[in-house]
Every structure is written in structure tokens, then in C-alpha cells.
């Protein structure tokens, strides 16, 4: 099953993105504690604004992680089933994803393996 190979395929990029995310989370936690103890309202406000910016950055990192994993999964899937470069691959993947994404890549792959014969 291809879904078990995704993390190995993107390990280095995940390490970098995960490290950035962890640094951001640590800074959010630090600023939250400091802001709660801050006497100056203007400095507290600036810290709260920075926390909002850091949370936005962390959501972007999280989205990037999901995007990198999905791109790797799709590439591995297309190669495994011999449909790399097939113009109908995306449509087949989209259908499989719509049925199986709530259960993870394993179900997406199961649906894809059923549908792939339609595009070969």
C-alpha cells in the first residue's frame, strides 16, 4: 500500500516544516504567558497582535505540510498504478478522495485502486 510510504518520501521536508511549526508554537506559548503578566497595555496589545500573526503563520505551515504530503501521495499513487502522466488521473484521484479522505490515505488508495481501471 502506497499510503505507508508517504512519510518516508517527504521525511526531510516534514522535518524542516515541523521544526518551524514547533518554534512558532513555542513562541505563541511564550508570548501568551508574557502578555498575561504585562503591565503596559500597549505592549500587551502588541504581543497579542504578534500572537495572532504567529497563529496565522502556523496555520499556513500546517496547510503546507498537508499539501506536501498529498502531493507526494498522489505522485506515488500514479507511479504505483501506472497512470503517471495520464490526463484523467486528477479526476480519478478527486473521486477517490471524495469518497475516502475522511478515513485517510488508506481509504483513498482503496477507492483509487477500484476506479483506476476506468482510466487505463
Image (cartoon, rainbow, N blue to C red):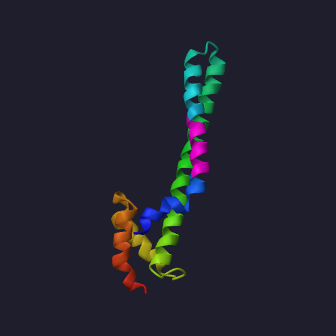
Q: Which image quarter is the C terminus in?
A: bottom left
- Residue 34 at x, y percent in the picture: 59, 20
- Rendered residue at 52%/82% (across/down): 87
Please state if 80 lies on the left or on the right of 99 as rendered. Answer: right
- Residue 91 at x, y percent in the picture: 45, 76
Please state if 14 lies on the left or on the right of 119 as rendered. Answer: right
All told, the count of numbered labels is 0
- Rendered residue at 50%/77% (across/down): 79
Q: Tell me where residue 35 sits by quadrant.
A: top right
- Rendered residue at 56%/53% (across/down): 14
* Rendered position, 50 above or below 103: above
* Nearer to us in this view, 10 or 51: 10
Q: Which image quarter is the N terminus in?
A: bottom left
Magenta span: 15-25
- Rendered residue at 61%/30% (across/down): 49
Please state if 103 lies on the left or on the right of 64 as rendered. Answer: left
- Residue 8 at x, y percent in the picture: 52, 60
List the single residue furthest toward the top: 39
* Rendered position, 100 above or below 18: below
Q: Main secondary structure of the magenta part?
A: helix
Q: Tell me where residue 46 sits by quadrant.
A: top right
User: Does the magenta portion include 21?
Assistant: yes
* Rendered position, 13 above or below 29: below
Amino acid at each position: 500500500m502506497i499510503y505507508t510510504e508517504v512519510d518516508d518520501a517527504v521525511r526531510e521536508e516534514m522535518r524542516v516544516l515541523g521544526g518551524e511549526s514547533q518554534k512558532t508554537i513555542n513562541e505563541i506559548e511564550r508570548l501568551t504567558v508574557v502578555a498575561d503578566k504585562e503591565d503596559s497595555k500597549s505592549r500587551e496589545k502588541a504581543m497579542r497582535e504578534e500572537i495572532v500573526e504567529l497563529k496565522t503563520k502556523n496555520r499556513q505551515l500546517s496547510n503546507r505540510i498537508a499539501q506536501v504530503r498529498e502531493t507526494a501521495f498522489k505522485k506515488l499513487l500514479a507511479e504505483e498504478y501506472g497512470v503517471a502522466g495520464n490526463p484523467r488521473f486528477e479526476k480519478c484521484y478527486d473521486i477517490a478522495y471524495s469518497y475516502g479522505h475522511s478515513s485517510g490515505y488508506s481509504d483513498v488508495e482503496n477507492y483509487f485502486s477500484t476506479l483506476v481501471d476506468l482510466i487505463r
